[in-house]
Amino acid sequence: MAGAVDFTSIAQQFVKFYYEQFDTNRGNLGALYRPHSMLTFEANPSQGVDAILEKLQSLPFTSVQHRTDTLDAQPSSEDGGILVLVTGALLVEGSERPMSFTQTFQLRPDAGTFYVFNDVFRLVYPAA
Amino acid sequence: MAGAVDFTSIAQQFVKFYYEQFDTNRGNLGALYRPHSMLTFEANPSQGVDAILEKLQSLPFTSVQHRTDTLDAQPSSEDGGILVLVTGALLVEGSERPMSFTQTFQLRPDAGTFYVFNDVFRLVYPAA
């Protein structure tokens, strides 16, 4: 897989930035989406910057921390798209224990940077 | 999101077929990949039908059952690609308890059917 360093490194930088913004200033996340971007958050779909930002701002936790446990990246298109799969833990203020989550993104290149085209988030409950 | 029924229904059919084949005749999964397909299984990358099939056949469980708990799908490209995120549980014969997993696929259309272009699998351990 040629260019493995590049797409993995871009994915790592993106994920770090994304969760830092999510955990400190969620309103900044709007800059990462475009009008055709999609978010499916716990099965609820939103499309476009405004709808996605509204969804993210409406989440019922005001103080939250994401911990990234694993990150995998693959090229997703011939024009430089990147598929990212994250697993990790969500630490919500006032809750007793972290919750496992998984999130997948498709990043697309645009004018020297990347934006989020696909975004799917799910909490993962213990299997047994 | 126009066509929501179509891509979700295709994703559901694919996921059902994929895990049925995985759990009954893993060798059949080769037909779902193409020479440029990628699999990252617990951080180990494979590319191409032969390498992917070899990886899947080499997994250290001979009898396994996948349980799908959630499935989300989004269009991933203008030409009909579909991004799928699955969470579920893996029940390995002889093991005491199911393990949570997450898996993301990008399906691409090809001659009236779909093949797997991206495939990333991760076990998810309890967060705390």
Image (cartoon, coloured by chain):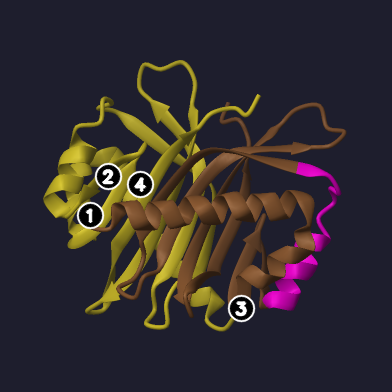
Chain colours: A brown, B yellow
How many numbered discs? 4
Residue A97 x/y as whole percent:
75, 27
Q: Secondary structure at mark 1?
A: loop
Name the amino acid type tagged 3.
Answer: Arg
Q: Are marks 1 and 4 on the same chain?
A: no
The residue at which mark 1 appears reads as: A1
Residue denoted by label 2: B45
* A84 relative to A88, above or below: below
Q: Residue at x 54, y 41 (%)?
A: A87
Judging by the rendered image, the residue that carries numbered circle 3 is A34
Using a 10 Å C-alpha cutoff, classify the residue at mark 3 as few (fewer than 14 neighbours), some (14 to 19) or many (20 or more): some
CB under 8 Å between callouts 1 and 2?
Answer: yes
Q: Which residue is mark 4?
A: B19
Q: CA distance from mark 3 to mark 4?
A: 34 Å
Q: Is residue A87 left or right of residue B34?
A: right
- Mark 1 to mark 2 CA distance (whole Å): 9 Å
Secondary structure state at the residue bearing disc 3: strand
Disc 2 with disc 4 on a shared chain = yes
Kind of residue at disc 4: Tyr
Q: Residues within 10 Å of mark 2 (few under 14, many from 20)?
A: some
Magenta span contains residue B45 = no
Do the CB atoms of the residues marked 2 and 3 lie less than 8 Å apart?
no
Q: Is residue A53 magenta?
A: yes
Is residue B8 visible in the rendered image? The answer is: no
The magenta segment is: A49-64
- Label 2: element kind: strand
Q: Residue A116 placed where, x, y %?
A: 55, 68
The spot of residue A99 in percent (x, y) is: 69, 35
Q: Nearer the viewer, mark 1 or mark 4?
A: 1
Image height of B86 relative to B33, above or below: above
Mark-to-mark CA distance, 1 and 4: 26 Å
Marks 3 & 1 on one chain: yes
